[in-house]
Image: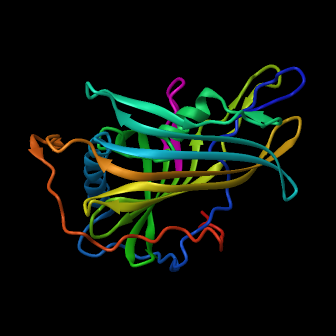
Amino acid sequence: MTRLLRCWFFLTLLACGLGVAAPAQEGDLQNVPPQGTTPEEIVKRFAAKETEFAKARDQYTYRQDVKVDTLDGDTVDGEYHEVFDVMFDDKGKRIENVVFAPQSSLKKIYMSEEDMQDIRHRLPFVLTTDEVAEYSILYVGQQKEDELNCYVFDIAPKKIEGKKRYFQGRVWVDDNDFQIVKTYGKTVPDIRAKHGDEENLFPKFTTWRQQIDGQYWFPVYTKADDELHFKMEDVHIKEIVKYQDYKRFGTNVKILYNGQELPQAEKKPDQKKPDQDNPQNPPQK
C-alpha cells in the first residue's frame, strides 16, 4: 500500500504488520541440535520439497480473499477488500477472476504494485532449491507447533539484487514432511527515495499453511498488524489474507518433479488454523 499525502507522496505498506494471531498451541523454542541429521541436510531436503510445492500449487485453483484496514485507535478509518479466484481458462492458461472488489476507502495509504505482487508471491513465501543460494539460513532450534515438531530457521537475503524482492524472517519446517508450515517476517527491501518523501514500507506478517490432499502444505491464512513509520506520520494497518477452496485442476493433469509424477500421500493431521478470536503475539526473534 502506499501512503497518501496532499502532494501524492508515495509510501507503501504491505500485507500488514506485526502482532499476528499465533496458533493456540505453540511450545517454547528449544535451542538444541537436530538428531540424526544436520541443519544443512534439513535445508537441502525442505528446499527440494518447496520446489515440489511450487510446481504443485501452480496446478491448483483457489480463492484468495484480501482485506487491508487502516485504523485510528481502534476504529477502522479505511479499507481495501478484494476477492479473486485463481483458476484456468478453457485453454489451460492460469488466470485471475475478480469476484468482489468494492471501491477502496483507504485515505492514508493506497495499494501499490509492490503490495499486489507481494500478496500473490511473497506472503505465501516459497524457498526452492534454486533460491537457497540467495539467502543466509541460520538454524535456531526446534519448536512445537500444535501437533507438529518443527525445525526453526532464520532467513535473510545475502544481498539485494536490483529491484528484486525477498523475504526476511523465520520459517518453521515440519520434521516429518520437511515442508515449511509457517513463516513470520516481512518482504524486503523497504524503499525510500534518496531525495523527497517517497517511501514504500512493508510490515511484518505471519503465514500459516495447512496440508492439502494429504501431500502439500499450502498457505491458508496470513495475518499482519503493524504500525509503519513514515516520515510524515505513523499509520496503523491490519491485513488478513485467506486462501480457500484448493482444488487440483483437471483429472488428467500430472504434476511432475524430476520426471516423475508426484504421489498422493496418506492424510496426516492438519496444523490448526490460528484462533482468530484469541490473537496472541507471534514468536519474536
Q: Is residue 84 rendered to the left or right of residue 180?
A: right
Instruction: Please say if 174 is above or below 170.
Output: below
> Any magenta on residue 167?
yes
Magenta residues (range): 157-168
| Secondary structure that dominates the magenta span | loop
Colour setup of the view: rainbow
Q: Is residue 169 left or right of residue 181?
A: right
Residue 4 location, quadrant: top right
Percent from the top left, x then y, of residue 91? 26, 24
Say which quarter of the image contains residue 38. bottom left
Q: Nearer the viewer, residue 12 or 129?
A: 12
- Front position in the image: 30 or 120: 120
Residue 132: image location, x then y, percent:
35, 44
Percent across and percent down for residue 263 are 14, 55
Q: Observer-nearest residue: 99 or 149?
A: 99
Q: Quadrant of residue 275?
A: bottom right
Which quarter of the rendering shows the N terminus?
A: top right
Residue at figure coordinates x 90%, y 24% from the top left: 6
Residue 228 at x, y percent in the picture: 76, 45
- Residue at 72% in and 53% down: 226
Quarter of the image where the C terminus is located = bottom right
Against 13, residue 10 (above or below) is above
Q: Going by the image, does 80 lie left or right of 22?
A: right
Relative to 210, residue 64 above or below: above
- What residue is rendered at 17% in x and 58% in y? 264
Q: Is residue 261 above or below residue 198?
A: below
Q: Is residue 33 magenta?
A: no
Residue 135 falls left or right of residue 16: left
Q: Total of numbered circles in the picture?
A: 0
